[in-house]
Image: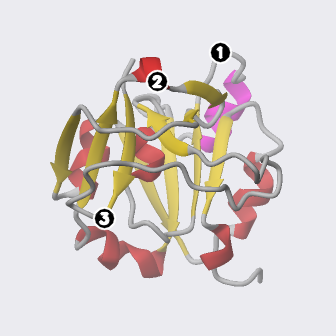
Amino acid sequence: MRIFHVSEESDIQVFQPRVPTRTDLDFTKGLVWAIDDKCLPNFLTPRNCPRVCFHSGANTTEIDKRTYLTSTSYTHVVVIENKWFTRMRNTKLFLYEFDIKQFTLQDENAGYYVSETTQTPIAKFEVVDLLQEQIKRNVELRCVDNLWGIYDDIQKTTFNWSMCRMHFAQPRI
């Protein structure tokens, strides 16, 4: 398994632990965050792009697959708002790979790994075409006017899901 930190910054040499802003985490411990290769598509978007991501897991039912997947060839979906599509086409990302031995699993469903110590990447990769990278990873990218419907619906399914940067999403309609 491989783990990465995704950034729009091209020149990060060392990752220092940062105090988490999430209220469900211990704010007394700084963390370096990474994402596993399986959930990496959830972060192949501009940093502040709000998104609803879901993928099939061991417990995903056939009825959920038929309801939420547009094709049997896709098992992973990233949903963004229409207004972010052009920005996604024009964003370049850098994947900083870490040695997994330095990290612990924080959230299996979302693919999050954390380390409480300073980390130096073992490799760096540039991703110039985010859409092509999603296609290469067999991920369906959907564009919608408003994310809140799929946000509410997907949480009631048997998919593994992750919602990111929702505070940047269009207001509920």
As drawn, is 96 to the left or to the right of 153? left
Nearer to us in this view, 112 or 120: 120
Report the residue at 28% width, 64% height from top.
9
Lower sequence index among marks 3 and 1: 3
Q: Which amino acid lies under the numbered mark 3 shown in the image of this protein?
A: Glu
Q: Which mark is residue 102?
A: 2
Q: Residue 115 in the image: x percent, y percent? A: 54, 34
Q: Which amino acid lies under the numbered mark 2 shown in the image of this protein?
A: Gln
Figure check: 103 above or below 161:
above
Q: Residue 2 in the image: x percent, y percent? A: 36, 24
Give me the C-alpha separation between circle 3 and circle 2: 23 Å
Give me the C-alpha separation between circle 3 and circle 1: 33 Å
Give me the C-alpha separation between circle 2 and circle 1: 27 Å
* Res 70 seen here: no
Figure check: 106 above or below 58:
below
Lower sequence index among marks 2 and 1: 1
- Asked which secondary structure carries label 3, the reply is loop
- Asked which secondary structure carries label 1, the reply is loop
Figure check: 15 above or below 105:
below
What's drawn in magenta, residue-wise? 62-68
Q: Which mark is residue 8?
A: 3
Q: Residue 52 in the image: x percent, y percent? A: 60, 56
Magenta-span inclusion, residue 39: no
- Asked which secondary structure carries label 2, the reply is helix
Q: Which residue is mark 1?
A: 58
Q: Which amino acid lies under the numbered mark 1 shown in the image of this protein?
A: Ala
> Given this view, does label 3 or label 2 mark the residue nearer the observer?
2
